[in-house]
Image: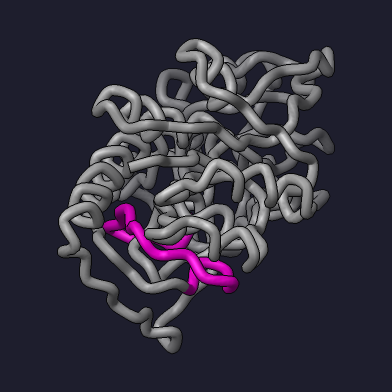
Amino acid sequence: MKIIFMGTPEFAVPTLQKLIACGYAVQAVVTQPDRAKGRGQHIAAPPVKTLAEQHGIPILQPKRVREEGVIQQIRDLTPDVIVVVAYGQILPESLLKIPRLGCINVHASLLPKYRGAAPMNWAIVRGETETGVTTMFMDKGMDTGDLLLARTIPIEPRETTATLHDKLAILGADLLIETLRQAEAGTLVRIPQDHAAATYAPLMKKEDGLIDWNESAFAIDCKVRGFFPWPGAYTTIHGKCVKVLQVAIDADTPGDFSEQQPGAVVQIDQERGPLLKTGAGVLRMIEIQPENKKAMRCSDFCRGYRLNVGDRFGEHT
């Protein structure tokens, strides 16, 4: 089976590694161009390119994959299947028609839920208790093709997008190999998606991470975990922006905080960090990153920034 692999970020690396380890003939890797990254804006290669170089696999890095010259390059390789994992560009119909066995995508959700660019983030932000990976035949829509195989895992109570990412990357690699083996054997079953049940996971914007303290403690906790490490949940205190890296719902601290405004500090604990009122319930702030500073435990933040009961997070947003 001749395979072209299309992928870009770290999430796609385990799948390419698995294809190589299982002896599949990866004719070429198509990935995004090298780009400037970080504060220094140094040019960096995509993780998938780095792995391909290590194994001597030919690499294509078109700015626009829909250009006819690029499509012809892929057509000339006569692939049996194109495997797509978080490539980062929409594939034109002319490309989808090239491989004999079609284009197979590994998507980090249980389709038709969470179609789109950020399924792991939004599954956590929206309080889901489980998610998974799905393989599907690609069509011209956005994650609308026929379903093939799926695997489910729980979303743990303290799960972040960072931890979920690593689990689903490995799960997706294994599922892709199983999908290819069934494709070779002619036993794959195509299941049309129930489009009426579809939900969406759009690309995140930095402003999505702004915490609304009128929301419940549960919703804020989900946002902090779902937006970690990027784009990050954030709020303000004393007129300055701070990233909120870790919180915990606190159901054990006694007291009536009903008179306090959402976002208000209702208790200072020098060891565990401040307790904040939300729209429903209270939340312990555990780890925070002040603007232009390193991350710190909120117990240290309380001492260093002279936080007092009654101070209010989010007051100036």
In the rendered image, residue 267, in percent from the top left (x then y), is placed at 49, 37
Q: Is 260 left or right of 39, judged from the image as shown?
A: left
Using the rendered image of the protein, determine whether residue 138 is visible from the camera's viewpoint.
Answer: yes
Above or below, comparing residue 288 to residue 177 in the picture: above
Q: In the picture, which quadrant includes the N terminus?
A: top left
Q: Residue at x 41, y 70 (%)?
A: 113
Using the rendered image of the protein, determine whether residue 210 is visible from the camera's viewpoint.
Answer: no
Q: How is the image coloured?
A: one colour
In the rendered image, residue 145, in percent from the top left (x then y), is placed at 44, 72
Q: Is 157 left or right of 34, judged from the image as shown?
A: left
Which contiguous range is marked in magenta?
125-144
In the rendered image, residue 236, in percent from the top left (x then y), is placed at 74, 41
Q: Residue at x 66, y 58 (%)?
A: 90
Q: Residue furthest bottom?
A: 196
Q: Is 134 left or right of 68, judged from the image as shown?
A: left
Above or below, comparing residue 138 to residue 77 in the picture: below
In the rendered image, residue 285, in percent from the top left (x then y), is placed at 50, 35
State the residue in front, 150 or 76. 76
Answer with the quarter of the image where residue 186 lies. Answer: bottom left
Q: Residue at x 49, y 11 (%)?
A: 54
